[in-house]
Amino acid sequence: MSNFILSIETKQLLERLMKVEVGELITYKEMTEIIGRDVRNNGSGIMYSARRKALNDCQIVFITITNEGLKRASDEEIANSGASVIHKIRRASHKGKKILHSVNDFGKLSNKSKIRHNASASFLGAIDLMTQPKKIVALEERVKKESNSITVTKTLELFTK
């Protein structure tokens, strides 16, 4: 637990977020009224802090409903949220590889930079491989077969075949 002290506004918003029921929406308008700042502009940091505190301390998850507010996620929504995270990671790894491939003169890099470049490219390549849709389907099938989550070792075995 950190020694970070929450602002009064963050505490006030957190108190309200803690009362939101599963499936209930708290609007941007209501959150703005609670803290006295527009949570979509200069009050966004307060909203993010309260939301993060709810997640970290109480395992309460909120999902963004575009142009409306935050909805407290159900267990079903939480369980299915991993797919969008994997998609974001895949996009980020593609972007990272593009950036790395933009080095104009690899030979002029310092040895340390060459090592870091190649290690990063290898790592991003592995992420790309592991987040391919067909690999995700294979992993889901393996989990289904095992009727439970599987170990990291068993997961990695799927990507070496």
Image (tube, rainbow, N blue to C red):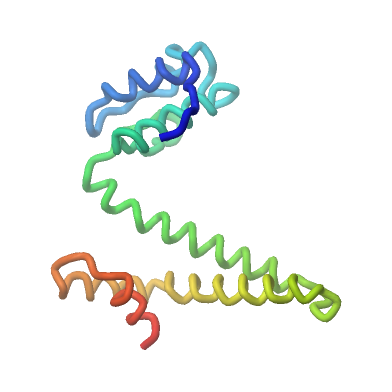
Residue 109 relative to residue 119: left or right: right
Residue 133 relative to residue 138: left or right: right
- Which quarter of the figure is the N terminus placed in? top left
* Residue shown at 79% from the left, 78% from the top: 106
Could you say which is closer to the camera, residue 41 or residue 58?
58
Residue 80 in the image: state x and y as whole percent: 29, 53
Note whether 74 is above or below 111 in the view shown. Answer: above
- Which quarter of the figure is the C terminus placed in? bottom left
The total of numbered circles placed on residues is: 0
Residue 47 relative to residue 152: left or right: right
Residue 111 in the image: state x and y as whole percent: 77, 76
* Residue shown at 49% from the left, 70% from the top: 127
Note whether 36 is above or below 41 in the view shown. Answer: above
Residue 66 in the image: state x and y as whole percent: 44, 36
Determine the residue located farthest toward the bottom in the rendered image.
Answer: 161
* Residue shown at 33% from the left, 24% from the top: 17
Residue 136 in the image: state x and y as whole percent: 34, 71
Q: Quadrant of residue 69?
A: top left
Determine the residue located farthest toward the left in the rendered image.
Answer: 147
Residue 57 relative to residue 8: left or right: left
Could you say which is closer to the camera, residue 157 or residue 84?
157
